[in-house]
Image (cartoon, grey):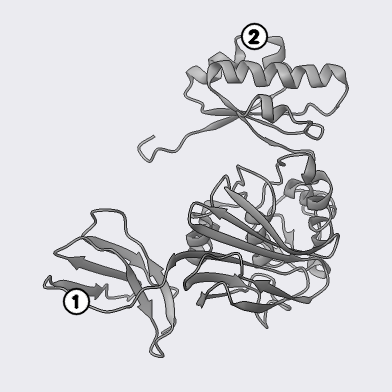
Amino acid sequence: ATKNVKVFLWDFINLPVMNSNRLAQLKALGAAGVKIDLIERDDQIANNWVELIAQRCAELGLMVIFHGVGKPTGLERTYPNIVNFEAVRGAECLKWDQTANPDYHLEFPFIRMLAGPLDYTPGSMRNVHVSQFSPTPTGIPMSMGTRSHELAMYILFDQPLGYLCDSPTEYRKFPEVMGFLSKVPTSWDETIPLSAKVGEHAVLAKRKGEEWYVAAMTNSQARQVEIDFSFLPEGDYFAEVLRDNEFSDVNAKILTREVIVVNSSSTRTINLTKAGGAVLRINNLVTSVGVETKSTFTVSTDLARTRLTIRSDDNLDTIYIVNAMGRVYEVIYPQENLKEINTNIAMLPS
């Protein structure tokens, strides 16, 4: 609560159906939403259950996710407190079979996803290639596809609540991953398909406010995709890129992070390894980088050279971190009225 984190509580379908006070009890515990599971049928009786729960949750001000449920039929239009429907072979299936595979990831967005939001539960940091995969019913499960392929799910898949399905300790190991995922919106203002073929690949651009996100994903076949940035407004923009590299073909966990400058005339070819992907976050117009101030500021690191601290007499606006060649590695936009920033630089090249 001190970090403004709200909680969903998981429940069996029969409990809130049989007990009309069940949802109110969960609300009283402090829940912001409920995840109702194990419906496991789509006959008229089950559909009545789903509508009943959606209505009761709306009356109580609760969000609701339906798991173990049939595909959506538009009920979320009547009850917008419905966040996700499962109705897909999600990541949990990797514990017992191989159905949630990279080929499937390029099939259901063209088919099942047309019906409405889904509940895939992405976020695995245990990425392996298909040839290295085996189901793991107990212990630590694996996922098929590169890490960039996994990240693309947060943009490509229609899932307002995208989850982080892995252990918190795993995300702490990869600040470049969490740095990106922490910024991905849960809803979008505009969606533009850039390139796609059923079962093979998809490249999609989505806008939230003035920020654009692009996801590229391929099936089990490696391929090149070209991203056309003509959807951008006039001007030059920074684009943070996380993508496969030449080593991802061997180690699915490896990716490259870079910052590039693009505009509406730009095109960029990206190599996707087998079961690979790429994501881009495009924000804020490029302005001249210089110093014209009477204020003083200090820049320092800790002894381990893993934390960068910047202090200023005036509020910090934009911070550019560049390498010795002048290439922008990262752009930081501090919160409003902030005179000190402390950021992790452990991932910066030496």
Residue 155 at x, y percent in the picture: 63, 55
Pointer 2 local density, CA inside 10 Å: few below 14, some 14–19, many at least 20: few
* Left or right of residue 128: residue 20: left
Give the quadrant of the N terminus.
Answer: top left
**Residue 147: horizontal and vertical position, in percent?**
65, 66
Gap in angstroms between the C-alphas marked 2 and 1: 65 Å
201 to the left or right of 318: right
The residue beneath circle 2 is 20
Q: Quadrant of residue 12?
A: top right
In the image, residue 244 lies at what x, y percent? 66, 75
What residue sits 79% from the left and 47% below the top?
A: 93
Are the two marked residues, 2 and 1, in contact with CB atoms closer than 8 angstroms?
A: no
Q: Residue at x 80, y 61 (%)?
A: 102
Residue 289 on image: x %, y %: 32, 78
* Mark 2: secondary structure: loop
Residue ID at (62%, 49%): 165
Q: Which residue is mark 1?
A: 292
Q: Is residue 47 above or below residue 337?
A: above
Quadrant containing the C terminus in the rendered view: bottom left
